[in-house]
Amino acid sequence: MEALIRRVNKITVIIAGLGLVGLMILISAGVVTRYMFGFSIPTAYEFVEQYLMPLTIFVALGYSYKSGIFPRVDTFVENIKSPKIKKGINLSILILEVVIFTFVTYLLFDFSFYSLETGMGFKSNGNAYTLFYIHLITAISFAWITVIMLNQCIKGFKNEKIDVLEENEEKNVI
């Protein structure tokens, strides 16, 4: 499972990186055309806001979680001497996170299919653009982070030495 998580995280980081490169190119081109040529690129702002920013942020959520970059409230756990109690508290926190992220994932999938049914999108420069795919990518990203959390829970139940909230397994993804 760890190898699969690593491979998928590599792919998601590459996709997020491509989204970031696209974001930088489009913003830079917009600035150059606005200040050097006196016009703005039509729909550039909308594409950056509606497509590229969510793509860059949400696709890399699983990698962000796995790398340990998310803040944790574990100050009181550090002071506990018993490893079993520490592990129990850490697993309880992780299970609560899984429940919350599962609920958020369900709501995001529900919303993405609602956006498909209603044709949710935006109009720019006379064209209509759908938002279903970005909503679906967001839901899939939250589902992926939930899978990673479930994997951490399973590892925590199987191994007594593992500290599921403190272990930082991925220093370099690429």
Image (cartoon, grey):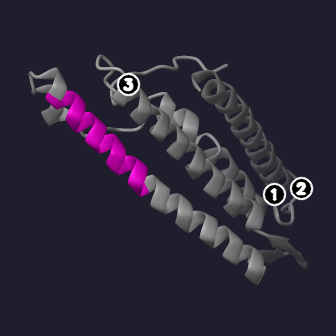
Residue 74 on image: x %, y % = 22, 35
What's drawn in magenta, residue-wise? 85-100
Q: Is residue 86 magenta?
A: yes
Q: Amino acid at mark 1?
A: Arg
> To which residue does mark 3 refer?
158
**Quadrant, the C terminus:** top right
Q: Quadrant of residue 62?
A: top right
Relative to residue 129, is residue 165 drawn left or right?
left
Could you classify mark 2 by the number of other residues whose Cα lies within 10 Å: few (under 14), some (14-19), or many (20 or more)? Answer: few
Secondary structure type for disc 2:
loop
Residue 34 disc label: 1
Relative to residue 101, is residue 35 drawn left or right?
right
Relative to residue 145, is residue 47 drawn left or right?
right
Predominant SS along the magenta part:
helix
Secondary structure type for disc 1:
helix
Q: Amino acid at mark 2?
A: Phe
Q: Is residue 141 visible?
A: yes
Question: Closer to the camera: disc 1 or disc 3?
Answer: 3
Secondary structure type for disc 3:
helix
> To which residue does mark 2 refer?
37
Q: CA distance from mark 1 to mark 3?
A: 58 Å
Residue 27 on image: x %, y % = 75, 49
Above or below 34: residue 6:
above
Do tag 1 and tag 2 residues touch (Cβ < 8 Å)?
yes
Could you classify mark 3 by the number of other residues whose Cα lies within 10 Å: few (under 14), some (14-19), or many (20 or more)? Answer: few
Residue 157 on image: x %, y % = 35, 30
Residue found farthest to the bottom: 118
Of 22 and 91, the residue lying toward us: 91
Residue 105 on image: x %, y % = 54, 58
Residue found farthest to the front: 158
Q: Amino acid at mark 3?
A: Lys
